Image (cartoon, rainbow, N blue to C red):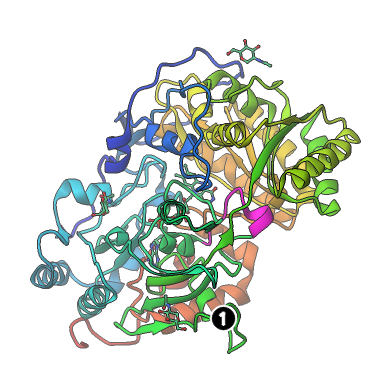
Amino acid sequence: MFHLRRQAVRSLRQRQLAQRYASTGPRSAGSGSGSSAGRVVPAVLGVAAVGLAAYALGRREQANIDAKPAAAPTTVAAATVASGSVNPAFDPNPKLRHRFGSPEDYAAAVDDLKGLFDDDHITTDEEDLAHHGGSAWTYGIALPPSAVVYPETTEDVVKIMKVATKYRVPVVPYGSGTGLEGQFSAPYGGICVNMTKMNRILALHPQDGDAVVQAGLGYETLNAELAEKGIPLFLPLDPGPDATIGGMIGTGCSGTNSVRYGTARGEWFLNVTAVLPDGTVLKTRQRSRKSSAGPDMTKLFVGAEGTLGIITEVTVRLAPLLPTRVGVVSFPSVRAAVDAVVDILNDGVQVQCVELLDALSVAALNHSGIMPNNLPEKDSIFFKFQGNPTVLENSAQTVQDLAGRHGGGNIHFAADEKESAAIWAARKGALFAALGHSGYETPMLYGNDVCVPISALPELVADSQAKFKEFGIYAPILGHVGDGNFHATIIMRGLDEVPMMSKVMSGIIKKAQELDGTCTGEHGVGMTKKKYLRDELGDGTLDLMLRIKNSVDPLGIMNPGKLYPDELMYEEVKWPPKAGSCC
Ligand SMILES: Cc1cc2nc3c(=O)[nH]c(=O)nc-3n(C[C@H](O)[C@H](O)[C@H](O)COP(=O)(O)OP(=O)(O)OC[C@H]3O[C@@H](n4cnc5c(N)ncnc54)[C@H](O)[C@@H]3O)c2cc1C
Ligand SMILES: *[C@@H]1O[C@H](CO)[C@@H](O)[C@H](O)[C@H]1NC(C)=O
Ligand SMILES: *[C@@H]1O[C@H](CO)[C@@H](O)[C@H](O)[C@H]1NC(C)=O
Ligand SMILES: *[C@@H]1O[C@H](CO)[C@@H](O)[C@H](O)[C@H]1NC(C)=O
């Protein structure tokens, strides 16, 4: 299949895990219509989010904790996907097609690969292709590849790259497919490389606090494995459900733990083994914990979204698992809450996580039944403390004192690790609670993740909330407030609302950029945020990115259509001259 097909996409994983929940009745927040005409007829596939609610159960959230929430989730969380693109901005750009091989080249590439891989390691089955083209979370971006290959070793990846280069066919690395910005979709078809058969732990070095793993291993699987072996270490980055190490590097991810542990841009990835488009295999450095040997080539791949090469093996650094305890404080306003957080962070209290849930988010949680206790439906901060029992008590007391100065109520301090895990699972389930609480028949998420210097957060949240009110959008706020990063949990009635939401979001992104912030705090750029990069990064940086891209990937076959603003990629490729003339 060489033409682009847009069709309904069902993520196999999500389907397998899907179940129906009973709705808990109408939501309390107001909403209007405001929907603008789309050019799509949404096909409701009813992808319920229970699989992701396993996530909500916090099952593997911190590997040593195995608690369940007091009540089962009772949220309806269906999503729709559609046939047809919903937003012209997500359409493949015809001006980039000239870079790739002809339909015959694509066919020859697939034939070559079929000669190199057996039926268990390559597929052109339409349903398989569709599963890899998008997910229920990519708001209608559903662009399947021409073939999916499942490598098991670095050598397999080299073979794939050589074929792709020979025929100028795009290569799209695919981890767990939890990316939210269309990063793993295939706008120009080509070879999707599903990395999840490369999920082995190659070496554990508990004394050094590191592990060498294949890049298709999920971080939750790694943490569960460590717990099972009785090794009290974990990888603290916590993005979407069982995201792969390769995908986490690809997007430069973070999550709730970044207040304490930083992000994928920190030093969690020591050296990586990567395969460049021409088949070159390299390791970026040695395993020692630090190194000043030249610029950091590991970081070149962090946030590159698979556009420079495929990472096959990674040495990850691990952190000691400490006892944790959760506490929740309600505030009179978002501003009061953030002011308190600023004081708390500057005090140096041992906090691991600082999450804002606005009143609407708390209401959604309360009504979902996944929260072990009823909380006042007010703007609230969920804290996770860490340390021995004395440190935990002292930290909670300090937070209580500082919060009190900003109108904070009494801290609800979890009784034990079990209750802590249940409350944290509820925090992780807040997205699903909002889907149910929206009251929409087929609610779906419009993802977003702006980030600003923390002192600017109240202004941005207030501005965003005003916009949501104006347009009648149901959008509880969930924030990694300790980092100035928040998600408006924008819930759409269907894909026809995508154009309206992207317009509203554009305004929020512009405002964030004005406040010295970014269009993406953690999800990455993908297909949806390319147009914001020039304003944010400036011409010089974009030019540097492009020079690196063109020298590493002169054919432009690595994950095309992502990250770089399209106009940068128009230029005719100068090297190598013709398809088939190399390798
Ligand atoms: C419910 C939910 C919650 C989420 N919460 C968070 C959050 O709190 N924080 C956060 O940061 N993100 C979050 N995400 C987004 C997502 O989990 C992250 O972007 C994650 O890093 C993607 O990993 P993945 O394995 O699913 O990668 P994929 O989505 O499969 O791919 C992501 C990108 O990485 C590239 N890639 C994948 N593997 C490789 C490889 N081996 N070599 C080179 N490139 C590769 C792909 O080409 C693509 O560009 C969430 C997603 C969901 C669905
Ligand atoms: C990717 O490959 C793994 C391992 O074969 C499989 O379990 C998973 O379902 C695949 N992903 C998709 C979207 O089909
Ligand atoms: C990192 O380098 C060490 C040598 O110091 C090597 O043993 C290891 O395999 C490398 N890891 C990766 C992922 O390349
Ligand atoms: C939580 O929601 C329930 C309905 O599920 C409601 O009866 C209760 O008053 C709410 N609690 C708070 C504190 O608002």
Q: Is residue 405 above or below residue 543?
A: above
> Which quadrant of the structure image shows residue 167?
bottom left
Q: Position of residue 535 (x, y in %)?
A: 63, 62
Is residue 253 positioned above or below 554 on the image? above
Magenta stretch contains residue 256: yes
- Circle 1 Cα neighbour tier, 10 Å, few/some/many (<14 / 14–19 / ≥20): some
Image point 33% across, 85% down: which residue?
A: 280
What residue type is disc 1 on? Asp
| Residue 272 position in % (x across, y down) | 44, 75
Residue at x 43% of width, y 61% of height = 245
Quadrant position of ligand 1: bottom left
In this figure, which residue is indicated by the disc labeled 1? 296
In the rendered view of the protein, which quadrant contains the N terminus? Answer: bottom left
Q: Viewer-proximal residue, 344 or 202? A: 202
Q: Which residues are magenta?
A: 252-261
The answer to whether residue 440 is left or right of residue 488 is: left
Q: Nearer the viewer, residue 581 or 317?
A: 317
Residue at the spot x=30%, y=42% of the render?
13
For the C terminus, the image quarter is: bottom left
Residue 438 is situated, as x and y percent measured from the top left of the image, at 52, 23
The residue at 33%/36% (across/down) is 81
